[in-house]
Image (tube, rainbow, N blue to C red):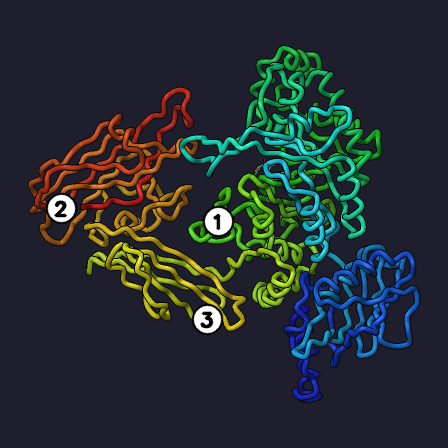
């Protein structure tokens, strides 16, 4: 029997035994995340008032005070903390060193509350208790009676934060740690260095933060855009060693271990800009302003190891945890291939290639760390060329790295991009703020199972747990950090804490709604993407009509919409019943909300209508299977593809030209054809080489409306216009030929360029 059934069963026993009037408990009162291992609701409430005493032995004083502070912050009631309990009306905690360190029991009855736990367990019991507190309509604080026995499924319950791409001040790091603690996460992976900024003070090398902590600007928009444009605003910051000590102590009080990451041998441009001798060429470079993978990496000469050992010595002095993360990911081998020192090293050690040189690099650092009783952890690329037994691996490129590592007896933390990357979109990209890409919904995170089926019971022991990663290329504000982790971190907390058998997404979702109230109380800017309103543009080519269909998966409440026309006139808000017919260019706004205004969400859809909108269209060659969303109607749906692009609004062609035949239904005046093409060269998407438009009255004899060559197209950019004097036409043939083979030195060199078209407008 799973936990939910058990819980429901216990509740129904009460309901039948006592009648509704006496037993006012309701399943919503027990909306705990992560779901405890076992929980039995009991009739009645414990009421917290001014006289309630928090009783804790000295050793638990810090936990008890944190609980009292949190209660004050959330509900305005400050309780006193004493060593001893009073006779009744107390919340008492006890340490039981024979329990597993993270385990606890929590018993709430009408006269008192008792938590007994292992080293960390009492703190977790208090987090559960905080989630159970409710302020009733009379303002009284109540905790529903319950018996809970709880312990986590995994020992590594991690959350990562990249502070290099964007820097977050000490006060926010503390907040982030509080967020983790509230959901019983116990590991904070702090990504402190990367190409775009070095964020940890190292006394021996002050330039690391003086120079490496600052960049001259930051990329505007998305790195897949056609051109790099910097905002030219100096950006940076770092943590002093004093800051770090303060944060480490803050985390420790919340039973969180910090795993610092010092990236090597790649993602090292900030360090190299401060000390150019660290690279193979020794050339002066600058702290990077855009995102990606870069060729300037640490050289493998001895002086670099000397430098890194000095850095790591200071790092170990600041962070008491066992693991030190050394990155190891995405290290291009270009510089090493050209470097005489690296090549001599390969020869001298009899290594096969540069991949084995990377392995040598990591193993050498690993030896140094283990001499100091620390363990190395790195991204799964550290498996390349062999890995020493005591190193641990973070599997990010999928689960294969994790499987391989566990099979060879290395410990593993699972962080696959598919489920654990919180920098990805969590809803339809057209409804979400700009993100790096991907699509990782709350439900997807929730569905994650950290133990790969491929492992034997013995090998499974090497899976330490899982972790959510927040890379911050597109996360520039504290609010955006909150948005990206809430509520996906809550889903992950249940993956790593709760028993696998009890998992149930729709139950989780209903508990999550209660937590949204808590987020509101705490002022957290969280994502409401689970209430996403899905937009679907329907091109009805028989009626020559466009309409917008709106749906939402959850909740099933009412939807409202209003329309702003081209002149800025805004219609009245109306209830959505059937797809909205779009007659003119306009912007449609839609909203869902419940009575409490918690479940509200909002979408916008712009339409730019022309004579081709909703017209019948055929393609001679189909687009590629990868980019054929609603082909061919995407071309006449009145919606221009967004930038950065996503797969939903563009048709992609790679080996064939696009030839579209549009039937306008009747003969009309035509003077201009607009082709909306994409230029995103980093993704191998190039503007076309030839555009030709022919028109016909009868569909048999065609006359040329116009033709453009490559240089004319380049000048126009992505809005390609073919103009002529007014012609009479019903049929329009649009021929667009892609660039073909990509030339030397351009992204995707030697491959066929992609041609992406989102819309063909006719005026
Ligand atoms: C890959 S994950 C990286 C990071 C980026 C991230 C963006 C990993 C080990 N390396 O440098 O920030 O993708 O999702």
Q: Vertically, is 333 above or below 692? A: above
Mark 2 crowdedness (10 Å alpha carbons): few <14, some 14-19, many ≥20? many
Which quarter of the figure has residue 740?
Answer: top left
Q: Earlier in the sequence, mark 2 or mark 3?
A: 3
In the displayed structure image, the side of residue 445 where residue 610 appears, left or right: left
* Numbered disc total: 3
Which mark is in front, 2 or 1?
1
In the displayed structure image, the side of residue 537 where residue 369 appears, left or right: right
Q: Residue at x 11, y 48 (%)?
A: 730
* Cα–Cα span, label 2 and label 1: 39 Å
Residue 328 in sight from this viewpoint: no
- Does the residue tagged 2 have its C-beta within 8 Å of any atom of ligand 1? no
Which secondary structure lies at badge 2?
Answer: strand
Q: Earlier in the sequence, mark 1 or mark 3?
A: 1
* Cα–Cα span, label 1 and label 3: 24 Å
Q: Vertically, is 181 above or below 476? A: below
Q: Which residue is mark 1?
A: 433
Q: Residue at x 35, y 30 (%)?
A: 753
Q: Which residue is mark 2?
A: 731
- Residue 81 x/y as whole percent: 86, 64
Which mark is in front, 2 or 3?
3
In the displayed structure image, the side of residue 111 where residue 283 appears, left or right: left
- Does the residue tagged 1 have its C-beta within 8 Å of any atom of ligand 1? no
Q: Are marks 1 and 3 in contact (CB under 8 Å)?
A: no
> Whereabouts is ligand 1, in terms of quadrant?
top right
Which mark is in front, 1 or 3?
1
Q: Which residue is mark 3?
A: 557
* Cα–Cα span, label 2 and label 3: 44 Å
Which secondary structure lies at badge 3?
Answer: loop
């Amino acid at each position: 029997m799973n936990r939910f059934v058990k819980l429901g069963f216990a509740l129904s026993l009460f309901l039948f035994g006592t009648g509704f009037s006496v037993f006012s408990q309701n399943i919503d009162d027990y909306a705990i995340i992560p779901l405890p291992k076992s929980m039995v609701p009991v009739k009645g409430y414990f009421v917290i008032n001014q006289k309630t005493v928090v009783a804790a032995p000295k050793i638990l004083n810090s936990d008890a005070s944190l609980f009292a502070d949190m209660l004050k912050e959330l509900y305005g009631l400050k309780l006193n903390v004493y060593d001893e309990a009073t006779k009744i009306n107390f919340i008492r905690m006890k340490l039981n060193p024979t329990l597993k360190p993270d385990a606890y029991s929590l018993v709430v009855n009408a006269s008192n509350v008792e938590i007994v736990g292992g080293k960390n367990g009492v703190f977790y019991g208090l987090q559960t208790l905080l989630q159970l507190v409710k302020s009733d309509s009379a303002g009284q604080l109540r905790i529903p009676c319950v018996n809970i026995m709880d312990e986590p499924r995994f020992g590594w319950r991690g959350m990562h934060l990249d502070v290099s791409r964007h820097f977050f001040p000490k006060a926010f790091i503390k907040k982030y740690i509080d967020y983790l603690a509230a959901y019983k996460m116990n590991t904070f992976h702090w990504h402190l260095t990367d190409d775009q900024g070095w964020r940890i003070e190292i006394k021996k090398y002050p330039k690391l933060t003086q120079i490496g902590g600052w960049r001259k600007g930051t990329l505007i928009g998305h790195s897949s855009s056609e051109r790099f444009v910097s905002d030219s605003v100096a950006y940076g910051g770092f943590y002093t060693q004093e800051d770090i000590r303060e944060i480490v102590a803050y985390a420790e009080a919340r039973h969180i271990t910090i795993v610092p990451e010092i990236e090597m041998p790649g993602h090292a441009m900030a360090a190299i800009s401060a000390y150019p001798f660290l690279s193979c060429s020794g050339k002066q470079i600058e702290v990077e302003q855009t995102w990606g993978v870069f060729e300037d990496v640490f050289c493998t000469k001895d002086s670099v190891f000397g430098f890194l050992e000095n850095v790591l010595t200071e790092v170990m002095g600041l962070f008491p945890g066992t693991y030190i993360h050394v990155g190891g990911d995405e290290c291009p081998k270009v510089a090493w291939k050209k470097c005489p020192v690296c090549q001599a090293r390969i020869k001298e050690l009899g290594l096969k290639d540069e991949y084995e040189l990377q392995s040598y690099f990591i193993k050498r650092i690993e030896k140094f760390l283990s001499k100091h009783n620390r363990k190395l952890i790195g991204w799964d690329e550290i498996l390349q060329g062999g890995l020493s037994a005591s190193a641990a691996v973070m599997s990010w490129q999928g689960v294969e790295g994790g499987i391989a590592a566990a099979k060879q007896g290395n410990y593993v933390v699972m962080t696959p991009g598919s489920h654990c990357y919180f920098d990805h979109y969590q809803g339809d990209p057209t409804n979400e703020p700009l993100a790096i890409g991907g699509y990782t919904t709350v439900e997807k995170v929730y569905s994650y199972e950290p133990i790969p089926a491929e492992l034997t019971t013995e090998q499974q022991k090497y899976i330490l747990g899982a972790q959510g990663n927040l890379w911050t290329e597109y996360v520039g504000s504290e609010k955006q950090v909150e948005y990206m982790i809430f509520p996906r971190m809550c889903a992950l907390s249940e993956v790593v804490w709760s028993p696998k058998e009890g998992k149930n997404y729709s139950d989780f979702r209903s508990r999550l709604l209660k937590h949204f109230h808590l987020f509101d109380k705490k002022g957290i800017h969280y994502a409401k993407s689970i209430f996403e309103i899905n937009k679907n543009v329907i091109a009805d080519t028989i009626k020559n009509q466009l309409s917008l269909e709106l749906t939402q998966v959850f909740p099933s409440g009412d939807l409202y919409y209003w329309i702003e026309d081209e002149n800025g006139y805004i219609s009245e808000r109306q209830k959505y019943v059937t797809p909205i017919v779009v007659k003119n260019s306009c912007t449609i706004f839609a909203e869902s909300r419940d009575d409490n205004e918690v479940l509200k969400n909002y979408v916008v859809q712009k339409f730019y209508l022309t004579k081709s909108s909703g017209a019948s269209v055929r393609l001679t060659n189909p687009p590629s299977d990868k980019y054929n969303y609603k082909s061919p109607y995407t071309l006449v749906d009145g919606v221009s593809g967004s930038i950065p692009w996503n797969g939903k609004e563009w048709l992609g062609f790679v080996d064939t030209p696009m030839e579209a035949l549009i039937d306008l239904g009747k003969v009309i005046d035509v003077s201009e054809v607009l082709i909306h093409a994409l230029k995103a060269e980093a993704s191998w998407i190039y503007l076309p080489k030839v555009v030709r438009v022919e028109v016909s009255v009868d569909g048999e004899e065609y006359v040329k409306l116009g033709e453009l060559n490559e240089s004319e197209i380049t000048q126009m950019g992505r809005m390609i216009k073919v103009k002529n004097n007014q012609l009479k036409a019903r049929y329009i043939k649009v021929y667009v030929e892609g660039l073909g083979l990509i030339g030397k030195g351009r992204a995707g060199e030697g491959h066929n360029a992609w041609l992406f078209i989102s819309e063909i407008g006719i005026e």
